[in-house]
Image (spheres, coloured by chain):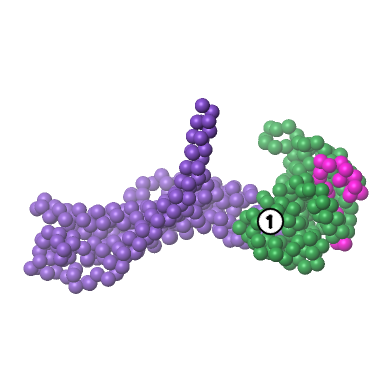
């Protein structure tokens, strides 16, 4: 009886040990394949011939085929080319928005921990304020104020998405500020600014990278949503949001491919970024393995 | 020059019991003073107040009659802690850690028994004793007038303890540094201190 339970526990132990390394490799594989898939999408968007997006009335309303992977629309434009160009545009917008957002989060999160109680109180209040406004409402308002276009969307995304990440950074930075080596650094005459740059930032960088990556899907989806309701990018640019909103009118005439395939492509792109973010997090956070 | 704590009072929490009440302590340049007392009697708290890590609720800490600046610049009262692995940035190489406050000359490092190959390692690659020597080197800047050693060698074996204390007392004498040494070990205090203060 005792023999059996000992064996069982031993097996469980070795299994979990093997699982840890398997898990790491697994994460890395997923990360790499997601990155490759993303790269293929970007290159596809980069290389598509602009001629494929021109109006060709003799090729109107074609169903998906090998010639036209996503079919063509009511003006004979190739939907695959338009979708890929649109995704490229979305990813650019999302990247700018997410990077700006992560930077705001870093500056405010570190300042809250660094500059004392009053500054912390003010910054926490600011976070609560921005968290309490629904993203979409704030986005619509900023996009509206900026008069539409890329600028409005990027500013809107940057302004609405930082609070969650800033909270995380603030908590982490606060903990670091009470670390003994940071306290010693103060007594050795180092300034707060110096400590933020040398002691805090290197520790917080992995969190910022992961946080920024995980902001990405939100940014892309919001860009598409804003463009869909007509406050985002101008109609002549093939953004995914515009493709979707235009195709709404043609859905009832049975042209399903106009909405379904670009929508699915958008979902795939978003999912890729989500996977990239969460698996980077797993690889950068060694404690996560031990919890598994 | 005299490091003086006058009427120091401190308690943890708003309504906690007073850990220190009207405590007086003085250390002069070049003097080695021991602080002895049981666990929880406030030795470390007193040390942290003197080194400016904590603000006392009552009383003042003065250096040569003037109050010590606590926020800016190199603090003339430096402290060496019990757990060196917490007192260094785990990502930094030792060369960078040692040079955080000043540029130690090679002679000082050598007298503390620091080897050159340690300097390119990160803290995880050094033992506790090796790390502690680096922490001492870091704290011995030219502007250091007083050094507080809080259970500095408690986790080291006897031989390493002797080496470290020997080097440290030698350096302190050379630079006329006043020292406050906290320890559980009455034998150690009796051996190296000019006088011993009970807690």
The magenta stretch spans which residues? B174-194
Q: Is residue B120 magenta?
A: no
The spot of residue A4 in percent (x, y) is 50, 31
User: In the picture, which chain is green?
Assistant: B
B96, above or below A115, in the image: below
The residue at 24%/54% (across/down) is A263
Q: Nearer the viewer, residue B121 or A187?
A: B121
The residue at 51%/35% (across/down) is A7
Dividing the image into 4 quarters, which one contains the N terminus of chain B? Answer: bottom right
**For residue A151, what is the image quadrant?**
bottom left
The residue at 78%/48% (across/down) is B157
- Residue B25 is left or right of residue A6, and the answer is right
The spot of residue A277 in percent (x, y) is 41, 54
Q: Nearer the viewer, residue A209 or A106?
A: A209
- Residue B44 is left or right of residue B1, and the answer is left
The spot of residue B100 in percent (x, y) is 69, 62
- Residue A209 is left or right of residue A146, and the answer is right
Examine the rendering and report whether any part of residue B47 can be seen. no
The residue at 46%/57% (across/down) is A209
Which tint was used for chain A? purple
Label 1 crowd bin: few (<14), some (14–19), many (20+), radius 10 Å: some
Q: Which residue has dot 1 on it? A: B126
Examine the rendering and report whether any part of residue A56 can be seen. yes
Disc 1 element: loop
List the single residue furthest toward the right.
Answer: B194
The spot of residue B176 in percent (x, y) is 87, 59
């Amino acid at each position: 009886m005792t023999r059996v339970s000992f064996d069982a526990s031993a097996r469980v132990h070795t299994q979990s040990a093997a699982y840890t390394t398997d898990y790491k490799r697994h994460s890395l594989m997923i990360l790499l394949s997601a990155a490759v898939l993303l790269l293929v999408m970007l290159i596809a968007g980069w290389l598509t011939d602009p001629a494929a997006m021109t109006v060709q009335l003799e090729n109107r309303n074609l169903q998906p085929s090998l010639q036209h992977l996503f079919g063509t629309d009511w003006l004979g434009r190739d939907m695959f080319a338009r979708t890929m160009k649109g995704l490229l545009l979305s990813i650019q917008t999302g990247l700018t928005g997410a990077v700006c957002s992560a930077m705001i989060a870093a500056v405010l999160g570190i300042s809250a921990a660094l500059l004392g109680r009053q500054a912390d109180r003010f910054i926490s209040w600011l976070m609560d304020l921005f968290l309490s406004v629904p993203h979409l409402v704030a986005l619509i308002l900023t996009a509206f104020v900026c008069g539409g276009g890329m600028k409005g969307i990027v500013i809107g995304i940057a302004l609405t998405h930082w609070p969650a990440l800033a909270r995380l950074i603030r908590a982490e930075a606060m903990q670091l500020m009470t670390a003994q080596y940071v306290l010693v650094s103060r007594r050795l005459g180092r300034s707060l600014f110096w400590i933020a740059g040398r002691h805090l930032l290197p520790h917080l960088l992995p969190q910022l990278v992961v946080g920024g990556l995980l902001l990405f899907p939100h940014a892309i989806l919001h860009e598409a949503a804003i463009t869909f309701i007509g406050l985002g990018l101008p109609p002549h640019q093939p953004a995914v949001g515009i493709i979707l909103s235009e195709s709404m009118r043609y859905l009832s005439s049975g042209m399903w491919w106009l909405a379904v395939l670009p929508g699915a492509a958008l979902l795939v792109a978003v999912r890729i970024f989500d996977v990239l973010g969460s698996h980077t997090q797993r690889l950068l956070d060694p404690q996560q393995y031990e919890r598994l | 020059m005299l490091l003086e704590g006058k009427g120091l009072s401190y308690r943890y929490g708003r309504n906690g019991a007073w850990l220190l009440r009207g405590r007086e302590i003085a250390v002069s340049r070049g003097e080695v003073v021991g602080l002895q007392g049981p666990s929880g009697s406030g030795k470390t708290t007193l040390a942290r107040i003197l080194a400016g890590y904590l603000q006392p609720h009552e009383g003042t800490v003065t250096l040569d009659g003037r109050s010590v600046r606590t926020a800016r610049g190199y603090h003339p009262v430096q402290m060496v802690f019990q757990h060196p692995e917490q007192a260094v940035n785990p990502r930094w190489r030792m060369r960078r850690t040692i040079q955080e406050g000043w540029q130690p000359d090679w002679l000082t490092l050598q007298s503390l028994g620091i080897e050159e190959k340690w300097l390119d390692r990160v803290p995880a690659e050094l033992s506790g004793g090796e790390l502690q020597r680096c922490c001492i080197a870091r704290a011995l800047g030219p502007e250091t007038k007083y050094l507080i050693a809080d259970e500095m060698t408690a986790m080291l074996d006897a031989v390493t303890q002797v080496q470290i204390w020997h080097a440290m007392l030698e350096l302190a004498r050379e630079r006329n540094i006043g020292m406050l040494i906290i320890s559980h070990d009455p034998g150690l205090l009796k051996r190296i201190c000019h006088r011993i203060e009970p807690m």
